[in-house]
Structure formats: structure tokens, C-alpha cells
Image: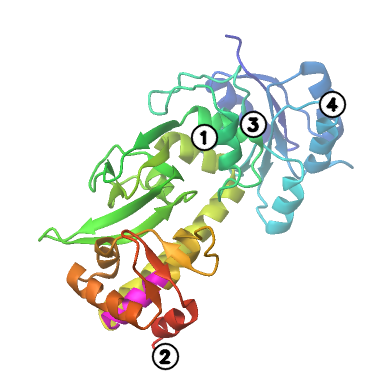
């Protein structure tokens, strides 16, 4: 296989020399290191590189973002931006050119290599990986379209998303099947493509507490891919489900190559942590009926289904035992309280395995402690 060709566009000679040396150590060929945007455009035409490292702030009339725009008019070569300025305005302006990644200066060799590997076209990339990632394979169009609707992947180019998918693996799991065990050192991150997964903690007596419910399209299971320690929970399928496993090294490389995705992912993680803190406070201080109402209110937008012909009712497909595990109570207590809520015409429990919310407003009032 021919060495992948890299073009370095950098107006600081020492940085350009350092980059050239490191990139050649990676096993790539440096086909040029122009100092201006105008020269970069011409060299892309002449040398046809496999990837371009482009400094955003260049000497001359044309900066790196403008040069990338000119290059995009005649070439689909991946552009990786080099910058010491990671401000929001610069990133938003650069995003319009659909870059393959960003590298902050002063650069780190591991980060630089990861970004280049993610950016390189498949024919120039090493599909066998380094022993840590997964082997590549074909990706279905249905999977690509589904992932493009899931945060944090919305807005990602299909080429970059397909590369991540080729390193991933789909798996069908039965209801009740364990997906990951707490303490496991080798588990990858996962996305729930179909179905629902519970993330569970157990105490020394074996009592289970559901700390997260992951419905279809939930990517919170990817947290395991960036946590280098052992798996923090046990993951179990509540219903027959399909998941997408993404190896740790491949997802970490993907995040390093896409800092805007990292930002979105962290924001969503912090939001989940805030919810977890609220749940902890509720478990410590609230009455069980308030905890049940709070849990159901929080679950409605995530899990509810609308049966045909009953559009006003909101249905959570969940057993009372699962609800008990979620609110930290016993099944008997949850059955007693939900039966009372049914008599109060707030819930309807006529269908096994379903909790139909008939009066969501009163349920919210109960969650707030107003009734």
C-alpha cells in the first residue's frame, strides 16, 4: 500500500518542520508545506494529497478557512484544521467547510495521529487497526440514517460517520439478557438502536437500583468508551433490543478528531448528571408516592407510546418491579401506591406490563408535592 500523502499548510517554519518530522514518523509522506492559503490551493491541485493539515491563521490575504473553501470547489480531500484559537466564533466559521477534524497547537502526537487516521479515506487508511479497534466492514444505509438522527452525531458528514460505523458491531439481545457487567474491564461503549436497556447498580444484599433507562436512540452507553476504568454499572436489556457496540479506541479517536462532537457529548452528560443528583435527593427525602410520580413524569418523554385510538393517554411500557427498582422501593409498595393512583384516575393499569398515564397534569402536581 502506498504511503498516505499529507500536505502541511503552516506559516511558522519551526512548527511546519516539527509537523513534517512527526508525520513522517507515523509512516506518512509529506508532499509539501506551503506557508500561504494561495500556495495551498495550488499544491492540492498539483500533489493530490490524501489529507491536508491547514493552519487557520495564515500570513497573506487568504486564511486557512478561505483556502479550505477554495479547495472544496474542486477536491473532496479531508481538511484538518491547526489552530491555537479554539474560540466559538472561529469553530463556527470553520464548521461551514465541514472539516475532518481539529488539532490544537501546541499539538500532541497521539492526538495528531488519531485525527489523521480518522480523516484519511478508507483506501489510504489501515483497516486492520492497531490491535485495539475493531476490523472494518460494510455499513448499511439504514444504520447511517438512524445514527444521523441521534445526538451527538447529528450534523456529522456521512463519510466520517461511516468510518466509525465500519469499526462498530451490531448485536441483537433478548429481553433480560445482560449486555455488560459492573467491573468489566473490556466493555466497549454502545448505542441502543432498538428496544430499551437498564443500567443497574446492586448493593451487597443484591437489591437492584436502576440508575438509568436508555430508550431507542440513546447514546449514553458510550460513556464507557471514554472512561478508562472498569464498567461502572450492569447493563441489561428490558425488552428484545438491538445495540451498536463502538470500541473504546475508535470512539476516543472520533471525539479527538471532532471537538464539536465532544462538546455536545459532554453537555448531554452533564445534564444526565444533574438529573442523577436530583434523583439522589428525591430518594433520600421524598415520599415513595412522590418518587413514583417524579419517575413517571421524567419517563414520559423518553419511553411513552401512544396506542392507536387513545392519543390522549401516555403509556410507559414497564412492570411495577422495574418501577420499584427505579425509585428504590419494594414491588409491594409500588403496587399499592400505583393502585391508589389508578383509583384516583391518574393511572390506568389494565394492561400487564404497561403504565398508562391518564392525567399527566395531576401526576406532575404530585411529583412537585402539590397534592
The residue singled out by tag 1 in the image is 109
Q: Quadrant of the C terminus?
A: bottom left
Instruction: Identify which residue is drawn at 49% across, 68% down.
Output: 313
Q: What residue sits right under mark 3 in the picture?
A: 159
- Single out the residue that lies furthest toward the left: 205
How far is mark 2 from mark 4, CA to CA?
64 Å
Q: Main secondary structure of the magenta part?
A: helix
Q: Position of residue 132 (x, y in %)?
A: 38, 28
Q: Identify the secondary structure beneath mark 3.
A: helix
- Per the rendered image, the range of residues in magenta is 286-296
Q: Quadrant of residue 277?
A: bottom left
Residue at the limit of the structure toward the front, as seen here: 309
Q: Label 4 to label 3, Cα distance in Å?
A: 18 Å
Where is residue 159 shown, x and y percent of the image?
A: 64, 31
Q: Nearer the N terminus, badge 4 or badge 3?
A: 4
Q: Name the residue: 76% across, 41% down.
A: 97
* Residue 33 vs residue 195, the one in the foreground: 195
Query: Earlier along the polypeptide chain: callout 1 or callout 2?
Result: 1
Residue tagged 4: 74
Would you say 108 lies left or right of 370 here? right
User: Which one is in front, 290 or 314?
Assistant: 314
Sequence-wise, the earlier of marks 4 and 1 is 4
**Distance from label 4 to label 1 (Cα)?**
30 Å
Residue 58 seen from this side: no
Rendered image: mark on residue 261: none
Marks 4 and 1 in Cβ contact (< 8 Å) = no
Q: Tell me the quadrant of the picture where the N terminus can be found.
A: top right
CB within 8 Å, label 2 to label 3: no
Mark with earlier residue (2, 4): 4
Amino acid at each position: 500500500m502506498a504511503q498516505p500523502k499529507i500536505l502541511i499548510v503552516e506559516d511558522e517554519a519551526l512548527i511546519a518542520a516539527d509537523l513534517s518530522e512527526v508525520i513522517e514518523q507515523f509512516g506518512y509522506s509529506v508532499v509539501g508545506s506551503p506557508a500561504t492559503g494561495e500556495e495551498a490551493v495550488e499544491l492540492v491541485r498539483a500533489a493530490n494529497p490524501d489529507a491536508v493539515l491547514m493552519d487557520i491563521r495564515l500570513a497573506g490575504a487568504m486564511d486557512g478557512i478561505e483556502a479550505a473553501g477554495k479547495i472544496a470547489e474542486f477536491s473532496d480531500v479531508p481538511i484538518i484544521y491547526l489552530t491555537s484559537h479554539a474560540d466559538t466564533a472561529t469553530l463556527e466559521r470553520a464548521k461551514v467547510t465541514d472539516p475532518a477534524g481539529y488539532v490544537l497547537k501546541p499539538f500532541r502526537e497521539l492526538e495528531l495521529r488519531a485525527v489523521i487516521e480518522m480523516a484519511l479515506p478508507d483506501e489510504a487508511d489501515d483497516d486492520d487497526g492497531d490491535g485495539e479497534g475493531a476490523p472494518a466492514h460494510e455499513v448499511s444505509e439504514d444504520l447511517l440514517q438512524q445514527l444521523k438522527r441521534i445526538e451527538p452525531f447529528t450534523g456529522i458528514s456521512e463519510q466520517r460517520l461511516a468510518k466509525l460505523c465500519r469499526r462498530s458491531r451490531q448485536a441483537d439481545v433478548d429481553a433480560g439478557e445482560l449486555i455488560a457487567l459492573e467491573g468489566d474491564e473490556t466493555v466497549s461503549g454502545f448505542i441502543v438502536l432498538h428496544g430499551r436497556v437498564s443500567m443497574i447498580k446492586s448493593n451487597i444484599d443484591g437489591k437492584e437500583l436502576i440508575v438509568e433507562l436508555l430508550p431507542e436512540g440513546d447514546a449514553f452507553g458510550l460513556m464507557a468508551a471514554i472512561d478508562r476504568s472498569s464498567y461502572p454499572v450492569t447493563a441489561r436489556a428490558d425488552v428484545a433490543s438491538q445495540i451498536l457496540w463502538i470500541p473504546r479506541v475508535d470512539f476516543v479517536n472520533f471525539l479527538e478528531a471532532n471537538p464539536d462532537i465532544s462538546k455536545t457529548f459532554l453537555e448531554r452528560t452533564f445534564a444526565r448528571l444533574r438529573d442523577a443528583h436530583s434523583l439522589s435527593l428525591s430518594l433520600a427525602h421524598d415520599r415513595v408516592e412522590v418518587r413514583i410520580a417524579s419517575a413517571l413524569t421524567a419517563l414520559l418523554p423518553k419511553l411513552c407510546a401512544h396506542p392507536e385510538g387513545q392519543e390522549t393517554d401516555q403509556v410507559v411500557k414497564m412492570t411495577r418491579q422495574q418501577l420499584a427498582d427505579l425509585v428504590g422501593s419494594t414491588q409491594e409498595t409500588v403496587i399499592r401506591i400505583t393502585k391508589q393512583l389508578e383509583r384516583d384516575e391518574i393511572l390506568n393499569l389494565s394492561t400487564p406490563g404497561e403504565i398508562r398515564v391518564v392525567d399527566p397534569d395531576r401526576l406532575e402536581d404530585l411529583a412537585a408535592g402539590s397534592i
